[in-house]
Amino acid sequence: MTGYVNSIQSLGGADGPGIRFTVFLQGCRLRCGCCHNPDTWQEKAAKEYTALEIAKKAERYKEYFNEKGGITLSGGEPLLQAEFSREIFSLCKERGINTCLDTSGSVMNQSVKELLAATDTVLLDIKYTQEEQYRSYVGCELEAVLDFLRYLDQKSIPTVIRQVIIPGLNDTEENIRKLASLKASYGCVEKIELLPFRKLCSGKYQNLSIPFRFEDIPEPAAKKMEHLRELLKKL
């Protein structure tokens, strides 16, 4: 089976537990205002690989993974290539490699369920905690993402909720309290990570002649991030 891959990061520490071999798949139907990878939006506009090629590439780095590390599929949105992703994960698990899925959780079908059956950890990007913001700044419904989280909880798949903190949109104590309530409500959620909004991606938008919707939004102050993280710990 083949699929479309935008890029590969051999050894990284920000995309799941331990050291990760991260594969950024091509294709995403969402249009998040804070997206760092607009070059992954167009489906099939990237290099084509077989699942076996990806698994063998990951296996080369197995000695660096130790117990926690492994392969992460990110994007783009790997759920759009669920069958390809499942085959990669299945081949990696045969090789004793831990599997992690970085996703928006906006797609659910039988192929996605089969992919999740081969997934050890999910990084779930819950971008906002208000339905209106999801429709305005993401392009899908929050309820679809919460349905995805309910399925992860039903299957007891270890989950890390991630959220990019964007000044003026979700940098509020109310938002943090809602995130904390998700952790309290779903046993599969191991932790919540708050990530600061960054604008290093501006050049990508310029090169692609695509307007960067959040160009005029400032990056959050370090003190603000510290305050929100401390609040989350207390909750």
Image (cartoon, rainbow, N blue to C red):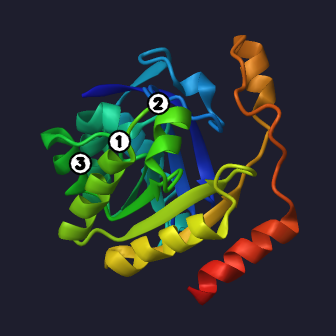
**Dot 3: element:** helix
Compared to residue 54, the image places residue 65 above or below, namely below
Question: Cβ–Cβ below 8 Å for labels 2 and 1?
Answer: yes
**Dot 1: element:** loop
In the picture of the structure, the residue carrying the numbered disc 3 is 115
Q: CA distance from mark 2 to mark 3?
A: 20 Å
Residue projecting furthest to the bottom? 234
In the picture of the structure, the residue carrying the numbered disc 2 is 30
Mark 3 nearby-residue class (10 Å; few <14, some 14–19, many ≥20) = many
Q: Quadrant of residue 34?
A: top right
Residue plotted at (33% across, 32% down):
80
Q: From the top left corner, tell me how far across and down residue 107 is, in percent.
A: 29, 39
Q: From the top left corner, tell me how far across and down residue 207 is, in percent.
A: 76, 15
Q: Is residue 223 left or right of residue 204?
A: right
Q: From the top left corner, tell me how far across and down residue 114 is, in percent.
A: 16, 48
Disc on the earlier residue, 2 or 3: 2
